[in-house]
Structure formats: C-alpha cells, structure tokens
Image: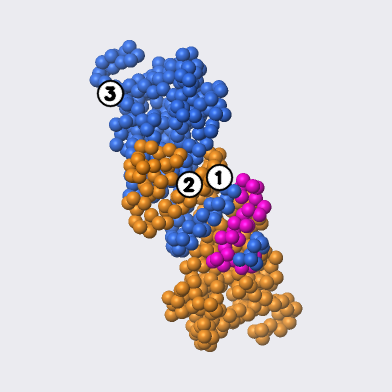
Chain colours: A orange, B blue
C-alpha cells in the first residue's frame, strides 16, 4: 500500500481499493462531507469484503435501489421508508432531539405530514367524514416544571380505519382529521377526531418486499401524529400509539417507545366529554405533552 | 438492552435501535440475506451515531439517492456508476475473480456492454465510421503455460474521440467499433478499429455532482473493453488503457491497474500492419491475454 498512499494511483486492486477510494473522497472534500462520506464508503467496502459480496448480489442491490428510486415521487417516499425500516430515521431523530428527562419523546415525522393544515377552534370536530370511530382527544402542553405553556400550535394527523391518511386521496379535496389548533391560555387542548388505525406501508413496493424478505409484516401500529411548536421551546414531533394494538412490538418502522403508548378508552353510545350525545360508540384519548426549552438539547 | 433482546420490543430509543433493527432483520431472513443486510444496516446506524448525522443530512442523502434513481434507465445506470465511484465495483470484481499469478487482470464490465455484437472476421475494420484515429489492434489469447487457446470469443468496445460509446447514439443504428471475433487456431486475434479516447461520466448527473463535491473530475482514462470467453476457462472481462492518458492516476471509477496499461504506438501516414497504406496517422496496439482455467479462482 505504500506506493498507493497518494490518491494518484495506478494500482487499484482488491487490497488497495478501500484506501484509495477513501483518499480520493477525502482529499479535497469539505471536512464534514469527507466525514459523512468516507465512513460509509469504507463501511460499504469492508462489508463487501467481509461477506465476499458477489456480482449478482451487487446487481440485485442496485436493482433494488433503482426500484426504490422509481417509486419515489411527491406522495411516495420509498427512500424515507427504507430509512425508517433500517432504523436510521429513529436514530437520527433521537440523537438530534436529546432533551432533559421528563420531556415528551420525539419520533420521526413520517411520510404524511402536510405544512399548515387548516386552523380549527379548540373543541371542533375535524373528522370531516374520515372513516373511523369518533374520538374525543384532549390534554395539556406543559413545561418541565409542570407550568402551562399557553398558545402552543398543535398539528395532528392520524390514519383512518382503512389505514389511509388523507393526503394520498386524489378524489378528496378537504383535509380529513388533519388540523392545526392553538392551545388555550391554560395549556389545554381538545378536539374531536377519529380513532387512529394501523396502516401498512405501500403494498408491493420495494419497502414491502424488503420487509417480506426479512420475514416481517409491513404494518405500523395505530397512532396519531402530533407536531407541537411554542416560542421558547424545542418543536416536538411525535406519535401517540394505542395500547391495544398488536403491531406495537413489531412496528415496521421501529418507532415505538413506551412513554408514547396511551390508553384510548372506548365508550358505548351515549354522553361524550364535550357534552354532546353520541349515537355510536366512541373513544377518548387524554395525553399531556412536556416541551423542552429551546436549545436544551443535551 | 436486556428487555430488548427480543425482536418484539416496546422500547425503541436512541441506544436500543441498532440492536433491535439488526434482530428484526436477521430473525427470520435467510442466512445469506441476514448476513448481507445486518452488516450494512449496523454500519449505517453506527456511522450515523459516530458522525452524529443530522436530519438535514439524512434528507440531503435521501434526495441524492432519489435523484440517482430518477436518472436510472436502460441507458443510464447511475447506481452502477455510484458503485464504480465508491470502488465497490472494483472490489467485488476483484474478489470474485481471484486467479493464479500471471493471468490477465479482470475489471468491471462498465455501463456500455452490449450482448452479442455482430461477428466479424479477423482482420476486419470494425470502426464503421466511428470518429477517431484508426488503430490496428492485435494480440494473442493464451493459457498460463503460454500455450495458445484457439477459438476464444472476443468482444471489444471503446469510446470514440468525442468520448462516446455507440450505444447511447439514438441516431445511429449500426454498431460502431463494437464487434465479436473468434480467435484463430493459433490463439491470435487482429482487427482494425479506432484509438480509444477518455470519456466523462454523464455531466450534470448525480454521479458527476458527487465527484464534484469530492473535488474530483468526472473522467475515465481512455481504454478499450475486452470480454474474452473460451470453453474450459474463466471468462475475462477487462480494460486495456493507454499509457499516455493523464487521467490514468485519477480514474473517476477507480479501475486502473498497471498490467492493463499498454503502449498504443502512433505512426505517421504510410504502410500499416495489415499491408494497406493509411492516408492518415494511425496507431497500433498489441496486447496478449492469459485466461485462468475454469474454477481456478483462489
């Protein structure tokens, strides 16, 4: 390898290629680019050597990546899905949102967030005909010391009982069960929406096939997404899961953690928390959030 | 981590996600799939942790992969190009074509191979109007002990003086400087073609941009591809480079090794090796190949 210590090399062979490629990446790249590229390149090549990767396996991997790419558009983000399946999304979220004990856990944003959904008043029904049992959702947004954070902006979006979010629905122009609220002066929020349902990542897509090859199912346990922002606090992006969901321990996207699992309580037809009377059975969910002060990441 | 030793886990957090994902991949996958997937997944996650990868860097990487995918079609294989740039193609080729000392070195196939090009007779001119100085190419195909291998099938394809192979040329129906020969009974081959020229990987493509970010150029040094097959011998896929090419030590695809660099000799107008008289300057290339016996890989 001595004669190959330089990046200008005429001896690229099996036992020199890793060093040469790393030198060629890092010689002139910015410091951060070199850092974030040489390590994966080196890992990739060391891995290929360790498992003695074959040409047909490389071809298969490249074909798989091509299929992932071909399936990507504004509505279908198969590379993000791959990052979710491989745990990268969860790890990167976690290590970039470290916060003091007692704050609500962060999760991935997921594929179905929409910027600036319609603003609703607290107490409104935001289902807009979304298919699922009604659910009365309420809670508080607090500081670590328990004091209220008034005026927090809260975005919510769940999947309906068919496992669908509203955004891939071409035929429906209105947002379903998707809204923004501003929490009240005493921290509280409440609204009427739907019970969240499990959903599968796109069937027959490359992510689905990859999970199938791992012998895994393609389902994510039921959850409602929350994005909560307040001046002076770190934004909180999170899920609230249902404790009765059998997919919780085997989430296709590896996101679940216990503090985000809640009891969605089912009631028969009758009086509801907002004083109305429901003709059908319904649920309630009460969940409080604790925001980290801005720049408190540890 | 003890409570997460199982793949069914409700505690996917920053410091458990790597183990959990690896267990989820390997629990039910085939042995080889588990081997070729857990290691890169683990490497990816360890790397993300080591460099404390940010969300925006993940987004940037995903965007880059999407662009690579979108640029892939039958004619433009940007994922193969990425494998070439990162040295994976060379490493995997080398470790899957190990052979006894003295055999010709193997290289990557490259992006421009075409199955079953037209068969020509030895001595034919295969340029078909390809733009470049004429070149008389000859040599022998031998065994390790120097004995001739008669009847070897030889495919050749170079880039022309504009740095183009014939395959991306929509407007040209005939193959240019691309042919198959059958070596003579005494091992020899000879044909008239063109001098190979350097070429750039596709400008403005994601591979080109990646190399640019590394501060590298996008050029591959001039070479002619050979694919040689003979019954009883390992197929040989290789390049023959020009020793006067300034891109040799910095090949964008990291393929060059010394035994494949040859002296392409330039002559003024006048008599040529095939007995004709050239009205222009021309080159000659003489290069011998040594095939490994089948299943002799070490």
User: Which portion, as a residue range, is magenta?
Assistant: B9-34
User: Residue A294 sits in which quadrant?
Assistant: bottom left
Q: Nearer the viewer, residue A157 or B119?
A: B119
Q: Nearer the viewer, residue B127 or B91?
A: B91
Quarter of the picture containing the N terminus of chain A is: top left
Horizontal and vertical percent for residue B27? Answer: 66, 54
Residue visible at 51% across and 50% down in the picture: A69
Residue visible at 38% across and 59% down in the picture: A32
Q: Secondary structure at mark 2?
A: helix
Q: Which residue is mark 2?
A: A45
User: Residue B248 sits in which quadrant?
Assistant: top left
Most extreme residue toward the right is A268
Residue B257 in sight from this viewpoint: yes
Q: Secondary structure at mark 1?
A: loop
- Disc 2: host chain: A
Residue visible at 52% across and 85% down in the picture: A145
Query: Is B14 in the magenta?
Result: yes
Q: Which residue is mark 3?
A: B266
Do callouts 3 and 2 point to residues on the same chain? no
Q: CA distance from mark 1 to mark 3?
A: 45 Å
Horizontal and vertical percent for residue B285? Answer: 35, 23
Would you say A214 lies left or right of A291 here? right
Q: Which residue is mark 1?
A: A51
Q: CA distance from mark 3 to mark 2?
A: 39 Å
- Disc 3: host chain: B
Residue visible at 48% across and 37% down in the picture: B94
Q: Nearer the viewer, mark 1 or mark 3?
A: 1
Q: Give the number of the disc on residue B202.
A: none
């Amino acid at each position: 390898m001595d004669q190959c210590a330089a990046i200008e090399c005429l001896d690229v062979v099996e036992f020199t290629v890793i060093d040469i490629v790393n030198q060629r990446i890092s010689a002139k790249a910015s410091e951060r680019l070199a850092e974030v590229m040489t390590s994966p390149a080196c890992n990739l090549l060391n891995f290929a050597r360790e498992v003695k990767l074959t040409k047909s396996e490389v071809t298969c991997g490249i074909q798989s990546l091509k299929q992932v790419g071909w399936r990507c558009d504004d509505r279908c983000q198969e590379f993000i899905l791959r990052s979710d399946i491989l745990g990268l999304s969860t790890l990167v979220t976690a290590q970039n949102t470290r916060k003091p004990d007692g704050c609500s856990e962060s999760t991935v944003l997921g594929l179905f967030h929409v910027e600036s959904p319609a603003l609703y008043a607290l107490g409104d029904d935001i289902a807009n005909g979304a298919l699922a049992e009604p659910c009365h959702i309420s809670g508080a947004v607090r500081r670590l010391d328990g004091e209220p954070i008034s005026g927090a902006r809260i975005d919510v979006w769940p999947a309906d009982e068919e496992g669908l979010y509203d955004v891939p629905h071409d035929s429906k122009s209105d947002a379903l069960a998707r809204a923004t609220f501003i929490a009240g002066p005493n921290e509280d929020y409440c609204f009427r929406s739907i019970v969240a349902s499990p959903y599968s990542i796109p069937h027959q897509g490359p992510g689905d096939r990859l999970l199938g090859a791992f012998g895994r199912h393609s389902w994510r346990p039921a959850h409602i997404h929350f994005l909560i922002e307040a001046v002076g606090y770190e934004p909180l992006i999170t899920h609230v899961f249902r404790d009765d969901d059998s997919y919780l321990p085997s989430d296709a996207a590896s996101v679940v953690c216990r503090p985000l699992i809640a009891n969605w309580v089912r009631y028969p037809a009758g009086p509801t928390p907002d004083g109305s009377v429901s003709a059908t059975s319904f649920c309630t969910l009460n969940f409080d959030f604790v925001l980290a002060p801005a720049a408190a990441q540890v």
